[in-house]
Image (cartoon, rainbow, N blue to C red):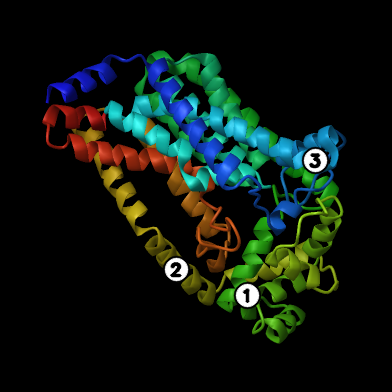
Amino acid sequence: MKKNNWLHNKISQCPDYVLLGAVLILCLGYRWFYFGILHPNAISYNSDSVSYFTIVNIFEGVVDAYRTPLYIYVLDFFQNLSGDNFLRHLFLFQQTISFLSIIPFYYISKNLLRNRYLIIGVTIFYGCWFPIIIQNVNINPESLCIAGSTFVLYLFVKYIEKPAKYTAAAIGIFPFILIMLKPTYLILLGVIPVFLIVRFIHFRQERKILYWGLLGWLIAVFGVLGYCEMNNRYNGQFVLSKVTLSNSLDSVIESGAYKHGGDAEFITVIDATRQRSFYISQFLLDNDSINNYKRCYNRFPQYLPLTNDMRFISSLPDTVNYPYERLSRFVKKSQYSMTYFVYMFKRTIDFVWEYIILFLIIILESIIIVFAFVKYRRIAWTLSFCVLFVLGQFISIIIGGIGHNHLLMRIIGIGYYEYNRLLVPSYPCIIQITASFVGILISSLDKEKFIKSIL
């Protein structure tokens, strides 16, 4: 008993930099063991990876219709730096950014959680969890997305602890950088103003500081609109990415709502091929995506073997490139049908059921947030941000037209690591939500600790 008390006192009195250093050493050792010994040649890629090997120059108005430019620039930088061996340096870069993100994650945990053992445990989990660290050898932006989500959450926590105009401005602007990495972060343009408005109402003394946050948010909004206009001028589409149309086309084909699209030629093509595969029908109509894939593949490392999805896309015939406007009209008209409404409703239920435990935790956490506000007039800022961000990700997945086939991807997929990448940007927030819930359960036996844990 005395030994346990001695250990507890030592950990309680130990400075943060010592605990964080120990956590970093442990995580570094585990990653070295996994990637250096167990899987020294680990690599993950798919047909989505190919689409990032395109040419962009935003300073000259040259943008890609399918991918926002930040990760394209990252790939281009390492290709120019290292030539054919660029993957080694790319993965080292992604490993480094991922490893360094453990530091802000620790301080986020310290802000949100009140149990030091839990802070240490959840940080080690973040630094060693397979679905996170495996993204570091993935030729996709997910690794940088995880680090980006952690950093924006850290900015949020830093502002809560000590409001400052530069931090507020950074909270407003940083979502634009993340959106240029992956459009899924568009949800932040809705979450950030909610935070700014609520702070503006509750804290009069912060209002001059919050104007900087609003200014940063406006810069991000106009930046996104400017990029969409650039895309419109170069590709004829006022969108961040044409991928949304492809996903929506897949959904209307899968649901059967395409019969209400009002385009006889499209309906005939789908009827003739739908039984073989929804994706065949989709790519025959959206053949521009096939042409784009083939252009990008010329810049993709040729020594890497084809994956199943890459082989499938390569086998598709080159057909008519139908105009974007015509495809968009067909999809929208199909979506305004009862067939599509019923399909979306069922898919939403299936999606919730797939992640029922996470949804239950989020619901319980939301109840606790409301209780804390009603009872103590306090807002659980960090936890609220995490909940809003994760819910926003869920909504964007459902509304964005991501097909049910995507939702069923799991860690036990093809080869090494094919699994659901849709929620990857939310992983830091999901971990914090779950850890917060565990912390509340642990402290529920002590009323005083329970109150502290929810506030």
Under tag 3, what secondary structure? helix
Under tag 2, what secondary structure? helix
User: Which residue, given by chain and number where applicable, does mark 3 sit on?
Assistant: 85
Name the amino acid, label 1. Ile
Q: Who's the residue at 63% across and 49% down the image?
A: 42
User: Which residue, given by chain and number where applicable, does mark 1 sit on?
Assistant: 253
Q: Of label 3 and label 1, which has the lower sequence position?
A: 3
Instruction: Say which quarter of the image contains residue 174.
Output: top right
Q: Callout 3: 10 Å neighbours few (<14), some, many (20+)?
A: few
Q: In the depicted view, which residue is nearer to us: 103 or 217?
A: 103
Q: Quick one: quadrant of the N terminus?
A: top left
Give the image location of residue 69, x and y in percent.
Answer: 74, 41
Cα separation between marks 3 and 1: 41 Å
Q: Of label 2 and label 3, which has the lower sequence position?
A: 3
Q: Is residue 451 above or below residue 2?
A: below
Front label number (3 vs 1): 3
Q: In the depicted view, which residue is nearer to us: 434 or 257?
A: 434
User: Which residue, given by chain and number where applicable, does mark 2 sit on?
Assistant: 345
